[in-house]
Amino acid sequence: MLKEGTNNVGGSTGTWSHVCDTCRSAPCVLYCHADSAYLCSSCDARVHAANRVASRHERVWVCEACERAPAAFLCKADAASLCSSCDADIHSANPLASRHHRVPILPISGSLFGEPEHERVYAFVNEVEAEEEEEEVFDEYDEVEAASWLLPHPMKNDKIDENGGDEGFLFGDEYFDNLVDCNSCGHNNNQFSNVYDQHQQNYSNTVPQNYAVVPVQVPQHFQPGLDFDSSKAGFSYDGSLSQSVSVSSMDVGVVLESTISDISMSHSKSPIGTTDLFPPLPMPSHLTPMDREARVLRYREKKKTRKFEKKIRYASRKAYAETRPRIKGRFAKRTDVEAEVDQMFSTTLFTEVGGSIFPTF
DNA sequence: TTTGCCTTAAGGACCACAGACGAGC
DNA sequence: AAGCTCGTCTGTGGTCCTTAAGGCA
């Protein structure tokens, strides 16, 4: 969702608009209001750990889109800190983007880099950790998202894919968007990823080959003390590997591969906000690293060119809709005469185009 | 500074019908 | 197993209506 051509938060190392005002060699990551200076992480640690007064300087992260202004909002969906201008630009681009949950970024004080964790201001811990793990986290986003491209079974959704589909795009953009939204919830990413890996290990260790493992029931345990707004984030996760997503023989059904698609698809369209939004994605083990890389690249390329414009899935229906009589914009019943004329039109068209009617794709 | 009115933009509902799809025979 | 019928559901576009936001007096 970030602007093209900017230094995307996905770990790329593009050209930085601001270098550190102190060392002039490293890219800045923070803006210090008190010093009116852009600082890199090491300089920030050095300068603001020098004394107690300096450590109280309020700093904000630099906008990850333009890298020219202090960040004002943290977009959970994009997991990006954005300035007001970039936030407005990015999140007014389309309706989907406008629904991204953003929170104001409050100034940070104290020592952020290389200091004991207990010295951090607790209110900003999540944000700080998210930033520190930024590159790693985003790699995991892509890993999880791209994982769906690596699925070994060509289980296309018939409903979605009535017209030939999207070359194996299994769950649709909505699924991925949810996935991105959920995966962008700060420190939970690593835990989710770890759980996922744990699942894969458990499955591969206990299930014989030629069988596929499908979660029959996803445990929905919540720890009451946890301060995590799952309703806003779009999924629930209690952060406890042993409790929340524990996989036992009671929770796992073993089915023949021939039936896996049906069962898996039933999990693929859970309503937003429900806890079984993310079925464990079967990770193929037979793919070579090159295959995997190729598919990941293909996925990323497609993700880059993803558009949110209306997509016509049935050209024939569009053609019919455009020729259909209307009353105040609403479809109206056809009279017999109109039906006859339309029949003639269709016959003529059929003759003119040599028998090919409306294309369907 | 607050309040009320007007304008503008965005999004949802509505309609009929072709075609896809599953169930049953 | 294949083919048929029937009922259900989905998707399509233009217009109207509602709601929210912004501007102005």
Image (cartoon, coloured by chain):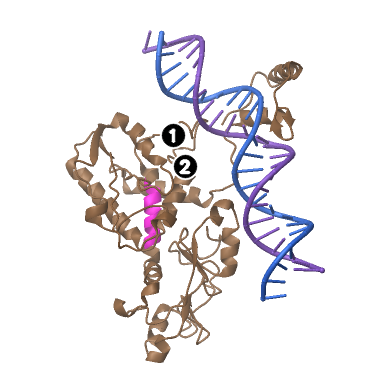
Chain colours: A brown, B blue, C purple
Q: Position of residue A68 (x, y in %)?
A: 56, 74
Dot 1: chain letter: A
Q: Is residue A43 above or below residue A331?
A: below
Residue A157 circle label:
1
| Vertical position of residue A214 compared to residue A321: above or below | below
Q: Is residue A258 magenta?
A: no
Which stretch appears magenta?
Answer: A137-147
Marked residue chain, label 2: A
x and y, in percent, of residue A164 in the image? 50, 31
Say which mark, if any, is on residue A172.
2
Q: Are marks 1 and 2 on the same chain?
A: yes
Badge 2 element: helix
Left/right of residue C16 with respect to residue A164 in the rendered view: right
Nearer the observer, A62 or A359? A62
Can residue A28 be seen here? The reply is: no
Give the image quarter of residue A85: bottom right
Pointer 1 or 2: first along the chain: 1
Is residue A52 rendered to the left or right of residue B4?
left
Regarding residue A79, the answer to whether it shows in the image is yes
Q: Is residue B5 above or below residue A70?
A: above
Toward the viewer: A61 or B25?
B25
